[in-house]
Structure formats: structure tokens, C-alpha cells
Image (cartoon, rainbow, N blue to C red):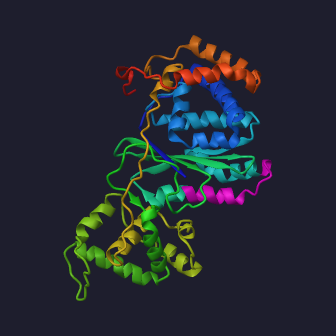
Amino acid sequence: MRNVAELPLHGGHVPAWLAQRMRKLTKLVLILAVDEYGTKGLLERLSDPIWFQAFNNLIGMDWDSSGSTTVTVGMIKDALSKEELGVKVAGGKGRASRKTPEELRAIAEHYGLDPEPYIRTSRLVAKVDTVAFQTGYQLYHHAFLLDEEGNWAVIQQGMNERAKLARRYHWFNTETFTIDPHKAIAGIRAKIALNTVSKDSREFQKTLLDIVSERPEKIEREFETIKAIAKGYRPLVYYRPRNVDEVTVLRRYESLGKLELNRKALEFARELGVRNYEELLLLKGLGPSTLRALSLVVELVYETPPSWRDRVTHPVDPFKFTYAVGGKDRVPFPVEKRTYDELVSFLEKLVEKNRDERTLIRNVARITKNWKFPEEEKRPT
């Protein structure tokens, strides 16, 4: 199950007066969500990029900002660390993401769970969105949410500096990591996407596993032959089984970055006898450039191309939720402290009531569900 969102890069920071209110509102929304849907229901909703973006808009972050991920996840992590709601967050942005394994171990042990499967999952989803699924984005944010029942979700984000865009990847309780593993994809469709985890790439994965069982020298020789052909050279013996333009194929791969074979990774793969694509992805030293080089060999020499389809399925557009308290950058209107405080006060009283006494808020939700905002007020921040 899957999810991805794409947003323009933004600078700036959240002022202290707004951050203080965001923390209060985030905590209250999480309490109500867990009470209404349970911890699994909360994780399922956070793994939906539209629901997540609506949450971001509700607390006053910019509706189209790359910072929505880091700030909103940070607020959620902070709230869940202080409230015992049966779910907690490990990881975060940059340096914090590297603490994910140790934080996951502490969370899992707190809930009486074996931490190792979740630590492996954390590594694997990062490898999928860095190596197995390449669209020109470099991951810089990784957050792992785990509940007391063992349900999990991952929210991670990558940056494409050339395009000035950030892309967000959401995961939820995935059982297979190598065949369409995300929950949905929302954002701007990439023209070139090396997708080796598509359902259309099953044969590609099988062929790749066969190739890495060969001697590294053989793989390197085939790779060098392809590069020579692309430069206009022709070996004495060259079998061209189909009408293919090697230069065009090579340039497609190179548009995503360098192509380099990591000899040690290939040796490890052969020595360990990797049994499936998950094991191959987790192999130390198997990075994006090595997978690109291997994929090129699989496509041109063994006539088994990967998928080049970027699975975008949802637009990122829950703009109407910005009307709750306004936006940090004044879209659709500046955040009003008095309105924000009144909302927090109302929700605090709502939290104190039992579920049967919350009929009013459910009726309001039904009434506003089909409300349409003025399109002219939707503008970039």
C-alpha cells in the first residue's frame, strides 16, 4: 500500500507564537483521531497524502510548502512523545533520521514488540525510495510511526534540487516491498522514473537476480561493452536481437545520475546468494548508481527492461482546510491568534466529552464536506 506527494521547496521558519499553538492543536487532533478511529486508523490516515496535507493545512502550515512534511511530522512526534496514545514516532529530518533504528528499538520494547522487523522495514523502505524507485529525488526525511499493536506507517521525503521540488512518500503496513509497495502517489508525474518495484517489473527483478549470481567480471565486461557501443564502437562479435537505440537508452539512465558498478556489492551478492529482490536491495554498497548500471545491462543485454512509469494517482489539493485558522504565509489569509485560540479551547472541551456527546462536531463535518472554496483565493505561497 502506498503514497507520495510533491511540493515546491520553501524557506523560512515557523514563528514561536504559531509553533506554540500548532503543538496544542496537533495534540488535540491526534487525541480525537485515536479516540474515533484507533491507532491503526490514525496511521492509515497519516499514510494518505491528502489527509496528511489536510492536517498540515489545519494547523496553519503553508498549503503548498515542502516544509509541511518536516514541521507537521515534527509536531506529531512531539505530541505523541508526551501523550500516551498507543503510537509513537521515530526518526525525522536529516540527522534525526539516522536515529531511527535506536528510537524504533526503544518504542518497540516499550510496547513489548520485537524491534528487529521494524528496523529492517525502516531500512528497506528507504532503500526502495532511494534505489529501487528513482525519479531524481534524494531522501532527507524519514519518520517511522509504530503503534502498540504492531501497525506501522512511514512518511519520508526527497528533494530534487534541479526541479526545486520535494516529493513525499507514504507507506502503511506493507507486506510486499517489491511489487507496487506504496499506498498511493500524489504529485507531479515525472517524465523519467526508473521503477523496478512496479508490478510490470517482475521479470526484470528475476533476471537481475540471475545476473548478480554471475561473476562480477562478466557483468563489468557487459557494462563496458554497452558504453563502448554508445560511443560508436562495435565489438567484433555483437548480437543485436532487436531494433534498439543504445545511445537513447543510455542517456535515459544517465539523466537520473551516474552509472557505476560497485564491485564489492556484486561480490557480496554472489557470495551471499541473495534469494529475492528485498535481500538484494538491503545489500551494503548497492546504491542508486549501481542499480542504474545493472538495470542498463538487464535492459540492453538481456532484453528485459524495468518499468519507466511514475505511479501518480492523487493530486495534492485539500486547500479548503487552510480556512480553519489561515496560513503561515498569509494564504488564504493570515493566521489569526484569537481564532486559533478559540478553536483550541473548543477542542479541549470536546476532548473532555465522551464519544456520544460529540454529535455536534460530526454534524458540522457533514455540512462542510461539500463546501467549495473560492478558486481565486488559491494562490502559491
Percent coordinates x, y for residue 302 in the rendering: 36, 78
Q: Residue at x 76, y 21 (%)?
A: 353
At 68% across and 37% down in the image, what residue appears?
Answer: 37
Vertical position of residue 285 compared to residue 88: above or below: below
Above-or-below relation of 347 to 11? above
Q: Residue furthest top?
A: 338
Residue 304 part of the magenta segment: no
What residue is rendered at 57% in x and 13% in y?
Answer: 339
Residue reaching furthest to the bottom: 236
Residue nearer the viewer, 221 or 374: 374
The answer to which quarter of the image holds residue 356 is: top right
Residue 71, compared with residue 129, is above or below; it is above
Prevailing secondary structure of the magenta residues: helix
Q: Is residue 114 magenta?
A: yes
Image check: 307 left or right of 249? right
The answer to whether any part of residue 142 appears in the image is no
Write down the quadrant of residue 337 in the picture: top right
Residue 371, horizontal then vertical, whole percent: 47, 22
Q: Measuring from the top left, give residue 97's x and y in whole percent.
A: 59, 48
Quadrant for the C terminus in the image? top left
Q: Which residues, given as a range, are shown in magenta?
A: 109-125
The answer, for residue 277, to whether it is visible in the render is yes
Between 304 and 35, the one nearer to me in the picture: 35
